[in-house]
Amino acid sequence: MRRLPLTLLAASLLMAVGTASAADHDTTIPAAAVHTAEQLRDRALQDNTGYQIVTSLTTEIGPRLAGGVNDQRARDWAIAKFKALGFDKVYTEPVTYPLWERRSESGSIVAPFPQHLVLTALGYSPGTPKGGLTAQVVQFASLDALKAADPANLQGKIVYVGYRMQRTKDGHDYGMGSAMRVGGPVLAASKGAAGYLLRSAGTDAQERIAHTGVTGFKDGAKGIPSAALSNPDADQLERELAYGKPVTMKLDLDCGIVGQYTGANVIGEITGSKHPDQVVAIGGHLDSWDPGTGAIDDGAGVAIAMAAAKLIHDLPQRPDRTIRVIAFANEEMGLWGGKAYADKHAAEVGKFQLGTESDLGAAPVWKMSASVKPQARGAIEQIAKVLEPIGVTYDAKRPGGGGSDLSQMHGKGMAALSLEQDATYYFDWHHTANDTLDKIDPKQLAQNIAVYAAFSYMAAQADGDFGSAPDAFAGDGSKE
Ligand SMILES: [Zn+2]
């Protein structure tokens, strides 16, 4: 060791001591808070507030396409619901995005064997010219095959990609399915195609129902008409293509971006008694796609977060920190609500104790992972112990991404959980006319609420923080 002047040595020792003591202070959850969390968990399993909330939303409002006829009505509903549930503070924050409209859509095979096909236009798709787009179909088995294609073979054609999504408990194949829908149209447009079709990014095989969803087009001027075929209709198209003769299709889409729209994130809070400025952030997204009533995507998430906070509200005393429930605007067309939220609140990321959003339906949570500072791992294990009896396994090796919109706050440095729901059947109904209330089992929804109520309360009562700080979790490997 080099010799240092005494004063410098003393200063460096002091700093070392200071750093060490801060680093050594483990975040823990007091025993009384663990006990209350267990009670909240058990109470949630017997409570039907969440199911009442999602019933109210899907019945009184129904489909909630961002910027559509029900957008304002849904916001009014959320404000009224937060107030009726007794939240201490209810407010909105504006979110501006391109307004996309769906007016009509149809498609058919013209040759060799004329057939009507069931399809749906994709978000941000422009419409076809008046009278429709009639063009030859060129088939690709994968995005890689499309990437490798010679643009000369695509000019003026309709590109079709026929990837079939597989059903899994963790829903991981949606990564590929959504890439076909988000990136595929952009790739086909860049190579000179006139239109884009995909086999729906969905796991149902026999339902003649197409799955909508967003494309990567943010600027209508650069897009090409894009749509998803139902699985049986994709089968039919592929059978015709297998004859080896040119297949011609007519696509007739009346849709597109018609301007800008300003909606809002709707936020309700249970104000903390000791540290009101420190928040546990939970939520769901208020918008949905238009064919269904947005029950599993994501009325369930809004209901889970609202009902979990309501249980904490009903305790004899307010929690130490604030529980903030965010009903995000326009998640579906590109995390607009989440991005606006993160931009607005990035500078105060250190005040976000812990957060995550529910956006994978209403089936039980079965896996938990976390991105927190090392000194908070013990507290996460305490949370895991309370959740274990209701079927949640803790995976200490994986990061926590914070869910869909709140992934943006996690990207700014918010400590985050991932609470993975069983996604086995979720993608059968996702983004379709079949996303309706009957797909939600009240008991399973209640399990989710038990998870959110228990973890939120423990995080709010923790002695210490979970490591939120600007860019604290950059490169943690989460990418939700
Ligand atoms: Zn969603």
Image (spheres, grey):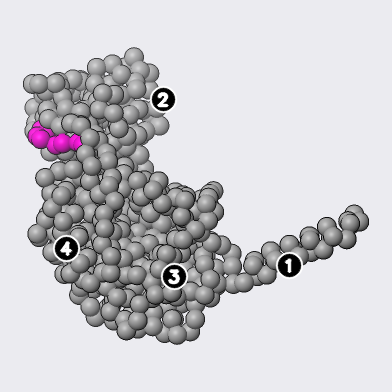
Magenta stretch: give its range.
99-106
Residue 36 covered by magenta stretch: no
Q: Marks 4 and 2, how far apart in space?
A: 52 Å
The percent coordinates of residue 283 (x first, y second) are: 31, 60
The percent coordinates of residue 383 (x first, y second) are: 45, 74
Mark 3 or mark 4: name the one nearer the start of the chain. Answer: 4
Mark 1 or mark 4: name the one nearer the start of the chain. Answer: 1
Residue shown at the point (24%, 21%) measured from the top left: 194
In this rendering, the answer to whether 40 lies above or below 403 is below
Q: Amino acid at mark 1?
A: Val
Q: Secondary structure at mark 1?
A: helix
- Judged by depth in the image, the label closer to the viewer, 1 or 3, is 3
Q: Secondary structure at mark 3?
A: strand
Residue where numbered disc 2 is placed: 148
From the viewer's side, name the closer residue of 306 and 89.
Answer: 89
Mark 1 or mark 3: name the one nearer the start of the chain. Answer: 1
Residue where numbered disc 4 is placed: 80
Mark 2 or mark 3: name the one nearer the start of the chain. Answer: 2
Residue where numbered disc 1 is placed: 17
Q: Amino acid at mark 4?
A: Ala
Q: In this image, 407 relative to 53: left or right? A: right
Numbered tag placed on residue 275 in the rendering: 3
Decide whether the magenta segment is chiefly helix, strand or loop.
strand
Numbered disc total: 4
